[in-house]
Amino acid sequence: MFEIIKYTPEYRQQWDAYVAKARNATFLFYRNYMDYHSDRFKDYSLLFFKKGKLHSILPAHQVGKTLCSHFGLTYGGLIMNIHVTISDVCQLFEELNLYLRLKGFEKVQYRPIPWIYHLHPSEEDLYAIFWKCKAHLSLRNIGTTIFMQQKLRWRKDHLRRLKKAHQNGVTVVRDASLSEFWEVLNENLEKRFGAKPVHTLQEMELLKSRFPKNIIQYNAYRNGHIIGGLTFYITQQVVHGQYSSTNDEGKEFGAMEAIYEQIMYHDYPDYPYLDFGSSTEQQGAWINDAFWHPEAPVRGFNVRSRLSAMNPLLDGGRAANLKLEQSGIKFATPTVNKINALPESPNEVSERMMLIERLGGVLKYSDVADRVFRSNLLMIDLHFPRVLTEMIRIMHLDGISRISELTEVIKQMNPLKIKDELINKHCFYEFKIKQFLMALALGMRPAKIYNGQDSAVEGILLVGGNGEVLCYHKSEKQVMEDFLFRNTRLEKGSLDKDKYGFLEKENGVYYFKLNAKIGLVKR
């Protein structure tokens, strides 16, 4: 029997001491690292005691009625020492299941630590969650790691750039300036994806001050100014590139090659693994082929399977929120609190909207919450954000989720007040919605700048319920558009995670946010 205790700060010393001796832990599991973003992740880490001694620990956080281990750390899973056995782990997960049910949890999302970080083989948890918890695989990613002791030959294009770095005075500095590099990183991410790093500069500087031997910044310089850099996480046997970025000069003069040469042949030549991180995008649905070979065409397919849980076409998130302005009667603060305090339920968003209307309020489309997503939607049509908002409102209030059925309702409503000829003869609403779905399938994302050009994604590979594989390619535009139109639906995202479904005050005005999430139907 295990005694399961939710982590509180009084267990900090015991927790950290266990991490230090564990066979499958990294410095990311020390509380000094885990707690830096405690404002964004509601900690629900657990300690397992057996006969009065700390047996194992589980870094985790809570999202509604789901226990996650651990989305704020890239990976999580059960942390074990050398004495933990497979029998222990099987019993532990059986008791953990019961514990979580009693605490009101309905689901667990489990991301185990990759095996390259194990000091000793430590995959007992994967056996236990499959056989004892009946877990199923919901997501599979692939990463790129090289075994440094094999001394693999560099590709010719990398050797050319490394030679260019040597000939043009590129120098590499260890423990270099994070702030200099962050300027390059921010500019690159904003330019290419309309995004920002997961960590702010202040957060990374804080973490580096707490773990100076584990977080190392390498910068490349030419003629006295920075041209690129890499932020490395150093664990017991893995050198992991957490962030990398160069400017145009750095690409031309081999900044990355110069840094990797320093890492591999001078500073960490005895380490077993050099980890480049994930080689997939869109939650594993698309393999970045160009990462693997310089001559590989930059193309890929979204993969969806009806035999398991499917990744959404549009994965919601806070960037995909749409704002409704609350007008009509002016609500007092107690009224707003009453509306927001409605209990959790599958229909709580619609219940709040209906309560607002019953109390005399009016919810009218205002704007898209994220400026990049707003611009992306405007590329479809200057009024498309309003159309999408109305579709989501109907989904919540009337329970209609299929895109094709929602489009019929929108045609009847005609929120843009356009002429019947444009609606019925020119099929205006169908045309715009198909255009939007096609853009999503080919790479449009809420937080990435979309300019209407073809992306690296060329189509969808769909595994049907009978195992048959179907390919929809953008060269057959009408076929692919019709497939998307008839086989997609609006879905409901997590209110806590995506921050929507509540009245929120901004600059003296109350807004009610809805969230855009679109997936393929299961059958």
Image: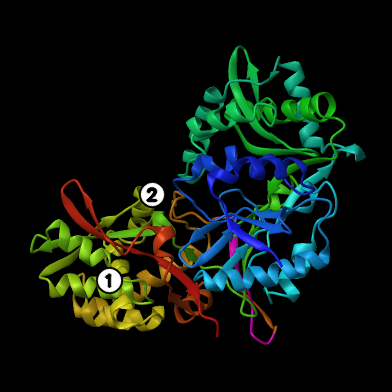
In the shown orientation, is residue 277 left or right of residue 7?
right
Q: Nearer the viewer, residue 111 or 177?
A: 111
What quarter of the picture does the C terminus occupy?
bottom right
Residue 72 x %, y %: 56, 50
Q: Does residue 314 sit above or below 135 in this rendering?
A: above
- Residue at the farthest front position: 52
* Left or right side of 418 for 430: right
Q: Who is closer to the viewer here, 86 or 188?
A: 86
53 sits to left or right of 352: right
Q: Is residue 476 in view from this perspective?
A: no
Q: Residue shown at 63%/64% (left/top)?
A: 301
Q: Position of residue 433 (x, y in %)?
A: 38, 71
- Quadrant of the image occupied by residue 341: bottom left
Query: What residue would you read off at disc 2?
Result: 372
Q: For the residue marked with disc 1, what is the amino acid?
A: Glu
User: What percent of the width, then of the height, locates residue 254?
Assistant: 70, 27
- Which residue bears the numbered disc 1? 390
Viewport quadrant of the N terminus = bottom right
Residue 464 magenta-highlighted = yes
Q: Quadrant of residue 55?
A: bottom right
Q: Is residue 393 above or below residue 27?
A: below
Residue 361 visible? The answer is yes
Magenta region: 456-466
- Inspect the magenta stretch and tell me whether residue 395 lies in it: no
Which numbered disc, 1 or 2, marks the residue that appears first in the sequence? 2
Label 1: which secondary element: helix
Q: Position of residue 229 (x, y in %)?
A: 63, 28
Q: How is the image coloured?
A: rainbow
Q: CA distance from mark 1 to mark 2?
A: 20 Å
Residue in view at x 76 percent, y 65 percent:
89
